[in-house]
Image (cartoon, rainbow, N blue to C red):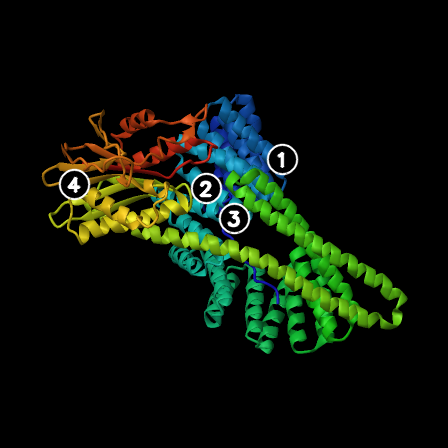
């Protein structure tokens, strides 16, 4: 039985949600246009009309856009020309005239460069990226989206940045880099906290759900689908609501929760029918039929597939009709009515082959080969098994070639070796298939001579090939499962690690005006931040950098978090220098069983602050990492003890306790060395602590959330295309 359709939510227009044009608005604009003289106001009016038609009748854009362009050229009105080109690009993109669309959007970008309007350039790059996404040219789409993000950050255009991030996530999703896709979407959600657009939140949540769904993290997918569903219902977005219901149906079917699946499918079909989305209505009926087939309720499955087929034929939707025909054939086959199964399967195959959908052709050939084998027509079964083998090889060859191109351009150096190993395994599998295929051809030729035993030989070869394909598929699945298990384990470790970090509620309650910039280099981090209220009404905050990053650093962070918590809660030690001394002793004890040279350096560089807000006083201890206060634009740096919280060479000296009298509007900064150690800039050099302190001084008088955004922008711009070298953690607190 065929797989269900999955609905993927995309941001592929500059405006987040289409604004539906009303005929009254267009009519009123057209009336004004009749009396408007040939000046820049007429250009603006023509462009407004073009935008209104972009939401309702795309074919009417060209006339108004071309008139606006001609008048803008006559008036030398550059902004008018740029907007006219944008409208023409949107029209051509909608009509799949991709080359022309790119030409028009590029002209908009050129005007943006000429006028030094970075905002115009960012929107143009976003639109070019959208066209390349439509064309499935993911490398170019990624390039233009990144340019749009970089430029929108320059001019603080959060809306463009958010849409570009969301579309970039779609690029990464399509090439299977789900980690990067989720990173983009979570950044987009963060940006939308400023815009507070519920529809955008819902769209992003739905995209996140689809990615989790494709990774088979189904509980996460369900959670994000429900978040999206709630917002879509609240804002009366019935089409999007129906898509979410369909996705939930797919997930529940995969979990074998059939009652929940049918409930969600029924909601989707009700909404699709209500709003007249006939193709989607046929699709969800087909999905219900597939589910009933799984439940072995063949009569009901047939009923739904017939309704789906009738609906598709009524709406001239050949592709949906073909899929329904194949499902009807599967039901007849399960009922052992092989003649009817053959009739419907061949009709469906004819359409699928015309469409050229390789995945569906593969499913069709498999079903038809099975039908013929069950009806003892081994000659036809063998023919369709050969077709199945051929399309498998074509798909796999295309996937291998595509994967090579993507790896060369998209993956970091440390991931390439793993990719090459996977490709080597794919090539070995391909060679095995070729050897087997040659053997099949030899047997087929020999079979012509041995006509009397043709059926027996064909059937025997068919069974052998089926077993071989199962084994090959099993080998490939084993590789994929192992990779997924490793990644799932690391992602689960990240959940554990983040759960142990100081919670947002705890920080907001005790530090009302603060920010935390936390950018792990890998999935898990060696940097962490920890906080605790003390029995003497003070607030402890530690900013820590453990030895290493990634998985080794994360293990050290878990050890250090547990020792900090134990020291304060169980030992009742709250003075920062004494906290560090006790934690150092505990770390040395914990690692004493392994005394090689590397582990002797295991520990952490850290700053631990104790805030007494009633008396505006702060005590702190610092191990290798200093502390900075910006007071009235003056930088006050407090140096650290030159040894870590852990075993090191030389005498284990006590940590120094320092006390600072705080003043109103002081900005206290604690940090690890990841920010200042990052390579980048024009010469690929380290940023260095001097430059980092200058950045802090330049932003200290701004709101804390703005400081966080500007710090992240500084970091990303400095890094450019260079890989992040270490975990980054910066915490800012305004007194």
> Mark 1 or mark 3, which is nearer to you?
3
The residue shown at (50%, 28%) is 80
Sequence-first disc among 1 and 3: 1
| Residue 371 coordinates in the image, percent (x, y) | 71, 71
Q: Is residue 125 left or right of residue 675?
A: right
Q: Is residue 553 left or right of residue 423?
A: left
Mark 1 vs mark 3, CA separation in Å: 27 Å
Query: Looking at the rendering, which quadrant does residue 365 occupy?
Result: bottom right
Image quarter (top left, top right, bottom left or bottom right) of the C terminus: top left
Point out residue 219 in the picture as x, y percentages from the top left corner. Answer: 42, 61
Q: Residue furthest right?
A: 449
Q: Which residue is mark 4?
A: 611
Q: Which residue is mark 2?
A: 165
Q: Earlier in the sequence, mark 2 or mark 1?
A: 1
Residue on which disc 3 sits: 173
Q: Could you tell me how far apart the alpha carbons at marks 3 and 4 are, in whole angstroms? A: 45 Å
Label 2 vs label 3: CA separation? 12 Å
């Amino acid at each position: 039985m065929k797989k269900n359709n999955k609905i993927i939510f995309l941001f592929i227009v500059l405006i987040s949600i289409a604004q539906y044009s009303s005929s009254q608005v267009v009519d009123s604009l057209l009336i004004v246009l009749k009396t408007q003289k040939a000046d820049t106001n007429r250009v603006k009016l023509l462009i407004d009309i073009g935008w209104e038609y972009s939401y309702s009748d795309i074919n009417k854009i060209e006339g108004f856009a071309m008139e606006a362009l001609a008048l803008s050229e006559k008036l030398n009105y550059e902004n008018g020309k740029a907007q006219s080109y944008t409208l023409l690009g949107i029209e051509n993109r909608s009509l799949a005239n991709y080359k022309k669309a790119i030409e028009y959007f590029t002209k908009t970008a050129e005007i943006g460069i000429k006028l030094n309007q970075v905002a115009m350039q960012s929107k143009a790059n976003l639109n070019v990226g959208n066209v390349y996404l439509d064309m499935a040219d993911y490398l170019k789409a990624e390039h233009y989206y990144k340019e749009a993000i970089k430029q929108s950050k320059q001019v603080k255009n959060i809306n463009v940045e958010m849409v570009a991030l969301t579309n970039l996530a779609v690029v990464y999703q399509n090439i299977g880099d789900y980690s990067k896709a989720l990173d983009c979407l979570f950044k987009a959600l963060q940006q939308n906290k400023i815009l507070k657009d519920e529809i955008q939140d819902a769209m992003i949540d739905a995209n996140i759900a689809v990615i989790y769904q494709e990774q088979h993290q189904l509980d996460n997918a369900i959670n994000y689908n429900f978040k999206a569903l709630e917002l879509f219902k609240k804002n009366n977005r019935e089409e999007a609501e129906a898509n979410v219901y369909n996705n939930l149906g797919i997930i529940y079917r995969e979990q074998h929760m059939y009652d929940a699946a049918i409930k969600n499918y029924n909601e989707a079909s009700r909404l699709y029918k209500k709003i007249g989305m006939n193709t989607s209505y046929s699709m969800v009926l087909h999905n219900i039929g597939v589910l009933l087939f799984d439940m072995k309720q063949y009569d009901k499955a047939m009923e739904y597939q017939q309704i789906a087929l009738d609906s598709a034929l009524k709406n001239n939707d050949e592709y949906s009709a073909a899929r329904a025909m194949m499902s009807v054939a599967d039901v007849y086959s399960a009922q052992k009515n092989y003649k009817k199964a053959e009739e419907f399967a061949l009709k469906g195959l004819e359409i699928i082959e015309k469409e050229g959908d390789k995945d569906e052709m593969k499913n069709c050939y498999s079903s038809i080969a099975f039908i013929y084998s069950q009806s003892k027509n081994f000659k036809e079964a063998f023919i369709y098994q050969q077709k199945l083998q051929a399309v498998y090889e074509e798909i796999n060859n295309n996937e291998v070639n595509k994967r090579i191109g993507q790896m060369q351009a998209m993956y970091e150096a440390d991931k390439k070796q793993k990719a090459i190993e996977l490709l080597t395994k794919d090539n070995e599998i391909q060679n095995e298939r070729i050897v087997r295929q040659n053997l099949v051809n030899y047997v087929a030729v020999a079979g012509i001579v041995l006509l009397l035993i043709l059926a027996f030989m064909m059937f025997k070869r068919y069974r052998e090939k089926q077993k071989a394909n199962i084994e090959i598929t099993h080998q490939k699945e084993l590789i994929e499962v192992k990779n997924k298990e490793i990644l799932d384990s690391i992602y689960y470790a990240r959940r554990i690690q983040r759960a142990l970090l100081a919670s947002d509620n705890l920080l907001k309650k005790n530090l009302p005006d603060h920010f935390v910039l936390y950018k792990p280099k890998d999935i898990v981090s060696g940097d962490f931040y920890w906080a605790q209220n003390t029995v003497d009404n003070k607030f402890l905050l530690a900013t820590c950098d453990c030895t290493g990053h990634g998985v080794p650093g994360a293990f050290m962070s878990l050890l250090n978090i547990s020792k900090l918590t134990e020291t304060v809660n169980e030992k009742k030690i709250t003075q920062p220098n004494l906290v560090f001394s006790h934690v150092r002793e505990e770390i040395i004890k914990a690692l004493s069983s392994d005394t090689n040279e590397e582990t002797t350096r295991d520990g952490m560089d850290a700053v631990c602050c104790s805030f007494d807000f009633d008396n505006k006083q702060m005590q702190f201890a610092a191990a290798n990492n200093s502390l900075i206060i910006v007071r009235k634009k003056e930088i006050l740096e407090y140096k650290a003890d030159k040894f870590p919280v852990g075993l090191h060479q030389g005498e284990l000296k006590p940590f120094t306790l320092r006390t600072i009298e705080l003043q109103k509007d002081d900005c206290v900064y604690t940090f690890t060395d990841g920010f200042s150690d990052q390579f980048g800039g024009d010469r690929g050099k380290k940023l260095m602590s001097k430059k980092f302190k200058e950045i802090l001084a330049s932003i200290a008088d701004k709101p804390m959330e703005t400081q966080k955004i500007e710090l992240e922008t500084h970091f990303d711009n400095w890094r450019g295309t260079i890989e992040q070298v270490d975990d980054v953690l910066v915490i800012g607190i305004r007194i």
